[in-house]
Image (tube, coloured by chain):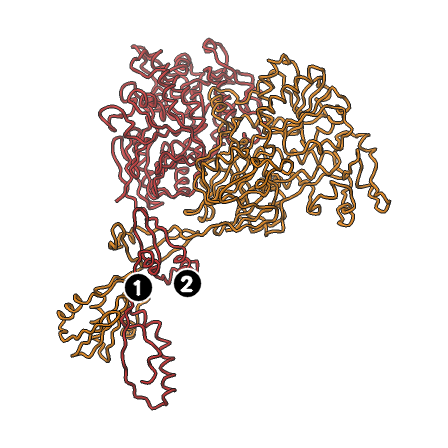
Chain colours: A red, B orange
Amino acid sequence: MPEIRVTPLGAGQDVGRSCILVSIGGKNIMLDCGMHMGYNDDRRFPDFSYITQNGRLTEFLDCVIISHFHLDHCGALPYMSEMVGYDGPIYMTHPTKAICPILLEDFRKITVDKKGETNFFTSQMIKDCMKKVVPLNLHQTVQVDEELEIKAYYAGHVLGAAMVQIKVGSESVVYTGDYNMTPDRHLGAAWIDKCRPDLLISESTYATTIRDSKRCRERDFLKKVHETVERGGKVLIPVFALGRAQELCILLETFWERMNLKAPIYFSTGLTEKANHYYKLFITWTNQKIRKTFVQRNMFEFKHIKAFDRSYADNPGPMVVFATPGMLHAGQSLLIFKKWAGNEKNMVIMPGYCVQGTVGHKILNGQKKLEMEGRATLDVKLQVEYMSFSAHADAKGIMQLIRMAEPRNMLLVHGEAKKMEFLKDKIEQEFSISCYMPANGETTSIVTNPSVPVDISLNLLKREMALGGPLPDAKRPRTMHGTLIMKDDSLRLVSPEQALKELGLSEHQLRFTCRVLLHDPHSDTDTLGRIYTHLKSCTISKQRQGPAEGKLRQGELKGN
Amino acid sequence: MKLYCLSGHPTLPCNVLKFKSTTIMLDCGLDTTAALYFLPLPLVHSPRLSKLPGWVSKDGAINLEKELKECSGRVFVDSQPEFCLPEKELLDLSTIDVILISNYHCMMALPYITEHTGFTGAVYATEPTLQIGRLLMEELVTFMERVPKAQAATCWKNKEIQRLLPGPLKDAVDVWSWRKCYSVQEVNSALSKVQLVGYSQKVELFGAVQVTPLSSGYSLGSSNWIIQSHYEKVSYVSGSSLLTTHPQPMEQSSLKNSDVLILTGLTQIPTANPDGMLGEFCSNLAMTIRAGGNVLVPCYSSGVIYDLLECLYQFMDSANLGSTPFYFISPVANSSLEFSQIFAEWLCQNKQSKVYLPEPPFPHAELIQTNKLKHYPSIHGDFSSEFRQPCVVFTGHPSLRFGDVVHFMELWGKSSLNTIIFTEPDFSYLDALAPYQPLAMKCVYCPIDTRLNFHQVSKLLKDIQPLHVVCPEPYTQPPPAQPHRSDLMLELQPPPMAYRRCSVLGLPFRRRYERIHLLPELARSLVPSEIKAGVSVATVSAVLQSKDNKHVLQPAPKPTPVPPSKKRKRVTEEPPESLNPKPLLSGAVPLEPFLAMLHKNGITEVKVEETADGHILHLQTEDVLIQLEEDATHIICDNNEPLRTALRDLVLRFLQKL
């Protein structure tokens, strides 16, 4: 029986270091190759020794596909391709290809230069790795080899995020990456056609959440920022340089304009300008409204938002600062956080999900004392707010996607086990399809039942369709008969007559003759006529009974 | 399978392909050359044009001085310019299922096709094609609506009158089918029917046909199309280029194995080399500027202009003309320049990689930033106060009949210091200039047409080997002006099928197979038997389900157990619906084994008689005759049904059933 096997090396009942192996129709595909923000040791990267114990992965993988540029989806890529060794194709969309190396370089700098780690990938490795990347366009069908084809769909989430369909013959898998089913201020909603995959692998970050309307959340966010600024406090918004940051910038920019506010807004890294430039050049990946108006007014040119300098953190008075990274696990956002944490007038707004082990996760769980490096502890007095702005689909969105794609099986990754469990039950109930949620290293096999494609002779098909009309009649199924010729690699279904002809065989006639004696008072011609009509009416059904009983010759009745 | 040819213009094609159950329109180009018969539409009142004498026939019998004006010995229609549409009478346009667009120049007739015709289908185009096509349509509409003409001339179209007009008006064909420009509403409505596609995207049409756009290398988002089923493949090649300009290179290998290749949109100037023309363009431009004159470049607002700007960007500094301003004047100038920068995915590798830096892919961004290139929506407004001479002006329309270019012709035409450089190949420059004669300004003709030339196309066809080629008639003979140049035509074996306007071609296709799917349960139940080495045969009896042009065979349902009832006996007597029909038999009944078999079944007294074709067996006890021949068996058996059945089964053991 053909089957599809799925093994998560990361993101199995967990968020972080997404890396899922899929075997379909004899092809092996790696979906995403991310790092885990919560760990600083070996567990940071997926365990590639699962694929092979000794050496390079090239011969074990047909291709690698990266869904979007977040590090938990691409952070292990240079490690995998350059240090473990993989020379095959790596697919990602254009914006991902553009932005991914910048974030990788950023990540490398923090790890190597700041934390002083060795045995990490180098800048050159990032460059070499990116040379193996083949860009993907939306909806383009890319033929990886003769049998394996992949196709990207728009996923929302961040600029350039894609869902991918992987197809071998009639078997197919869809991997969503991270996606968002509601359009936001700068991106559109994920979309997929009714492709009925054998398996849909979906993220489930917000498996149990049904978020209130976006407008309410936005209002809440603006209110909190506004209040803090009014009372002279400072607002820290830890973000990733690309993605949520742009959405919140657009939001604050328009609010500042409308309310005529004067408090400065800063964006921390030098990335901003560059990041916004990417958004301008890849405007076709943003939402409809921005795309429509970009010639008149480019939404990514901000008037109120200025570049941040480290010295500004100590300035008196209110301010709003966007700082990277988003989970407060390192870098500038953590630095500023340490400075502002002691003042209850200040506020930190976490606009996205935080992985276990990060400072962000700890303070969101209400921890008031943080152990910092060395022996110092940090008292958290500032207000901590959580605003779910991260663009993941919520439970409603996930169900919506299932309705869109109509998969035959479902597999959840990129979420917490407990929440997955809940969603799994819900999916199985509502759609009566099997739903799986393997842990890391655990393999799920899904038996597929592909139909067999056959070439049918047009004559036979047309004859059959003409008999029964084009529409199938469920009440009276009719059987069609043909001969399947299997030759070399071809399967052809033809009418028995044609099969005989093609195979060079001649038909064998089988005939029977019987004499039947009748006693009838009517005249000969009259009797003959009656028998003739009677026979005519039943010949059709008689002949169906098989060769032996058919073939009555009307002519031979004469004289009997 | 048929091809209806609604346009005879080789580079502005409009064909309709009927393939399986679908009706597919391939492009809908608008022939704007008809505008050349009309007087230019000036933006500002032109005393010269308004003073042109009206036309009266020599004998004075026909007076059309209101409609026709004479200029330097030629007669022009004084009315809003009209265009020649694709043929609308050849087939019912409401039956068209989809329209495939190959590039933005080949979609300009779209509103005429999709509006007011009952068209209910979809239009497929790439995103750049849609966006730039929209710009070009909006520009056309603005050009027309900016200077409304009170009257519409129609009297001259009267057959009796047209016959008496001087050439070339006399020879204009189909003048009654010419139409005025569409409106913005019609453009919006037509473009709302467009569905976006990406290169190599497989689009299913009704489950019957799959269409796929492929990069054609000619312009941003330009595509060739593959139209195929599982067994037949038609390639539609339109406006393709192998030169390295800004668009993504042409995808060639996917065109292989075509049954039919429809070839349109070759270069209109086969004798001019685009690179040479570009050099000439630059040197003429430099010469004029150095002498203190202005340069006018009538052009479309998208396409070659990007390459011209890039070329000038490098050239001007090296020629020490760095301070000369460039003006790009068009209602869509800004949009065109902005849009060109956001389609990185559709650009050539080298431009694509710029976006990763991130830098704008085209250098005209830098020209704008450094104020070397300025763009204006029209000559009115800021332009009039800001413009400095000598300068280079890029503006439309290349026909010189409408748009801001008309103003510059009036302004600069009288001075021999100025130069007009024609780069667009769509219009004859002499015809374009006719209503401005006499003209002192220098004219340079540097047509830049990057589409395939005959040499490239014959090499391409050799590589991809289509079984049949269909092309417009002009490609099958040398150009009329150069009748000896047999290298400027298509010479193929078998010769290409030529079409002209209103042709209906039957394409040489015989469809013999269709794809069907056996459900796995059915496939498992089949019992193949090997007939010859490597050839196996299985009899299939199954239920056919056809839905959305997809065919599936499922196992025949098990005969439902008949509920016990009084009729039971009768029911069993009747053959059930699902019983097999008479299978075909093949093979021969060998004599000796058959006799042995009879013997085994208790029939021992058999008299064998040899005949010309085989044997006659006389079963003496039973008084039954069996004729055995190579291809036939005849059993004569009276009034003994059990015996007949037994004999039948014995015979059948030796035969193969199909």
Camera-near label (2 vs 1) is 1
- Which chain is home to disc 1? A
Asked which quadrant contains residue A392, the reply is: top left
Question: Which amino acid is tagged 2?
Answer: Leu
Horizontally, residue B579 falls left or right of residue A256, namely left
Residue A247 marker: none
Dot 1: within a 10 Å radius of its alpha carbon, few (fewer than 14), some, or many (20 or more) residues? Answer: many
> Is the residue at mark 2 from the same chain as the one at mark 1?
yes
Horizontally, residue A459 falls left or right of residue B237, namely left
What residue is at 56 percent from the left and 45 percent from the top?
Answer: B498
Q: Position of residue A229 (x, y in %)?
A: 50, 18
- Which chain is home to disc 2? A
Q: Is residue B164 above or below residue A114?
A: below
Q: Can residue B554 be seen in the rendering of this structure?
A: yes
Q: Position of residue A19 (x, y in %)?
A: 32, 29
Q: Nearer the viewer, residue B203 or B382?
A: B203
Dot 2 or dot 1, earlier in sequence = 2
**Local secondary structure at mark 2:** helix
Q: Is residue B400 above or below residue A530?
A: above
Question: Which amino acid is tagged 1?
Answer: Glu
Q: Nearer the viewer, residue B250 or A353?
A: B250
Q: Can residue B329 be seen in the rendering of this structure?
A: no
Asked which quadrant contains residue B268, the reply is: top right
Q: Position of residue B364 (x, y in %)?
A: 58, 21
The residue furthest right is B60
Q: Which residue is mark 1?
A: A507
**Local secondary structure at mark 1:** loop
Q: Which residue is mark 2?
A: A467
